Image: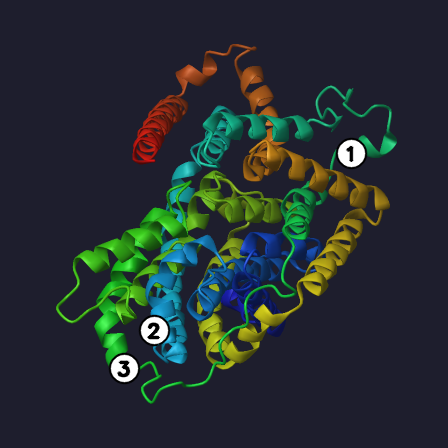
Amino acid sequence: MITEIFQNLFTVGNLIFINIGMFIGIIFGAVPGMNGNLAITICLPFTFQLDSVAALLMLTSIYFGSMFGGSITAILIKTPGTGAATATLLDGAPMAEKGQPRRALDSALVASTFGGVVSAIALLVFAPQLGALAMKFGSPEYFILALFGLSVISSVSGDSKLKGLIAACLGVLLGTVGIDSVSGVPRFTFNNMTLFNGLKMMACMLGLFAIFRMLERIKRGAAGKTGKTAQELKSASADDRYSFSDFKRSIGTMSLGSVLGALVGAIPGTGGAVASYLTYNIAKNHAKPGEEFGKGEVKGIAAPESANNGATAASLIPMLTLGIPGSAVAATLMGAFQMHGLASGPKLFEDHTVAVYTILLGCLIAQFFMFLQGKYLMKIFVKITNVPFRLLTSSLIVICCAGAYAIANRSFDVKVMIIMGIAGYFLNKLELPMVPMVLGLILGPTAESYLRNSLSIDNGNWLIFFKRPICVVFMILLAVLLVALAQGEKKQKQREAESNKKDAAVA
């Protein structure tokens, strides 16, 4: 099997698509207002004609590249391309201002590669182990697991847990459109034949993630460019280079950040931003004499970059093994796996062993390509920040329309995408998060199927879920999670109220 996996991975086509995905990811990560999730959503329809392994290697590479790409603008123009890169700005921007932009970027690149390699190894080692354990699951466990996944991502998306759950329910409702697979009864089709097959997940995702984002950008407008003019990537001082001594100084910090990033990333609902700030604070609190964090310290770049990239591949562990996406990108990738015939969950490793292991190993190889692209194509990535705003936005909208049409070669899906984009714009006004809605669309039909199978096992007895130990464990975990989140939200509101009172008193 090992020989087959290597033969499956190391083909010219796969290596090319890994590099294409990495290039696209870095560009989208480097442009403020864009992100890896948007890039994956836009590119997904164009992967339908590809082999599933090549397509998923490309999409996961976009994810990894976007995480590093966010550090480019954080360092050069003090505008993080991604939320996870905000901690990188604290020392990256001061180092660039001191005349060492190349040193800062190379430091971020080395730390990102280091963290990405550790994360990919964690994915390769621990995902199969957890997948083997999950093979003991049956239909009742799958149903509870789907509910758990919906509740987790809904509860950590946005400030209001209730609005997250409402968004998830809306997604589940959209998933019921079409002919019922069990009874054959049309549901919410309004006698429209095009709705009998349901709403295409890809069209909805393009609308909620891409078109919605473009509408937001159009409303905000821009001063002609996607960002401020980037600094020229030229050595401004004699010591503008990343040396081996810099690597030796930061190797401990990178190791800490990579491990913490992998641990935090594997927990649903956390992600790279949490890991990067956690590692940065630890490194800062244990700074040695002469290390000036916040003024261009190389460890201040190594800490957050190793952590946020350490969380990337590790965040796919619960998604691949349990079907629980821990972030917006993981939810989108979960839909991508499903569209390419590799449904995430406990059976994934059993049903598609070679394909999955090929993708896992490809995640490791992608980190080295990220280093090579970052090293030799940095000047190209930096110039992306100077692309005119109108040109970039209009081009992406055209690409989205072409992608929606390519799903099934019909204009109806383009209309669905536009309607969902407009709906997403107004839902955002109501502060309803998009990720739970898309996840509800993905997991809703699956949860319904497993619910019916579970009830048929025990003649419609709902107590079947209390007779299965694994179901009980996940229900307890879900109850504890919801209570903890409710308490946290309550305390946050109290702190905000106290802060408002203090501000009013000072005024």
| SS type, badge 2 | helix
In the image, residue 35 lies at what x, y percent?
A: 55, 56
Residue beneath disc 2:
95
- Specify the amino acid type for callout 2: Met
- Specify the amino acid type for callout 1: Asn
Contact? badges 1 and 3 (CB < 8 Å): no
Please name the colour scheme applied to the rendered image: rainbow
| SS type, badge 1 | loop
Task: State how far apart marks 1 and 3 are (Cα).
Answer: 59 Å
The residue furthest front is 507
What residue is at 63 percent from the left and 51 percent from the top?
220
Q: Which picture quadrant has residue 90?
A: bottom left
Dot 2 surroundings within 10 Å: few (below 14), some, or many (20 or more)? many
- Can the viewer see residue 119 in this picture? no
Drawn side of residue 230 relative to residue 119, left or right: right
| SS type, badge 3 | helix
Drawn side of residue 130 relative to residue 233, left or right: left
Name the one closer to the observer, 264 or 340: 264
Mark 1 and mark 2 lie on one chain; the one further toward the N terminus is 2
In the image, residue 157 lies at what x, y percent?
A: 48, 37
Mark 1 and mark 3 lie on one chain; the one further toward the N terminus is 1
In the image, residue 295 lies at what x, y percent?
A: 28, 68
Relative vertical location of residue 225 with respect to residue 431 in this rendering, above or below:
below
Residue beneath disc 1:
197
Task: State how far apart marks 1 and 2 are (Cα).
Answer: 55 Å
What residue is at 40 percent from the left and 52 percent from the top?
272
- Specify the amino acid type for callout 3: Phe
Judged by depth in the image, the label closer to the viewer, 1 or 2, is: 2
Residue beneath disc 3:
244
Dot 1 surroundings within 10 Å: few (below 14), some, or many (20 or more)? few
Name the one closer to the observer, 225 or 175: 225
Name the one closer to the observer, 197 or 462: 197
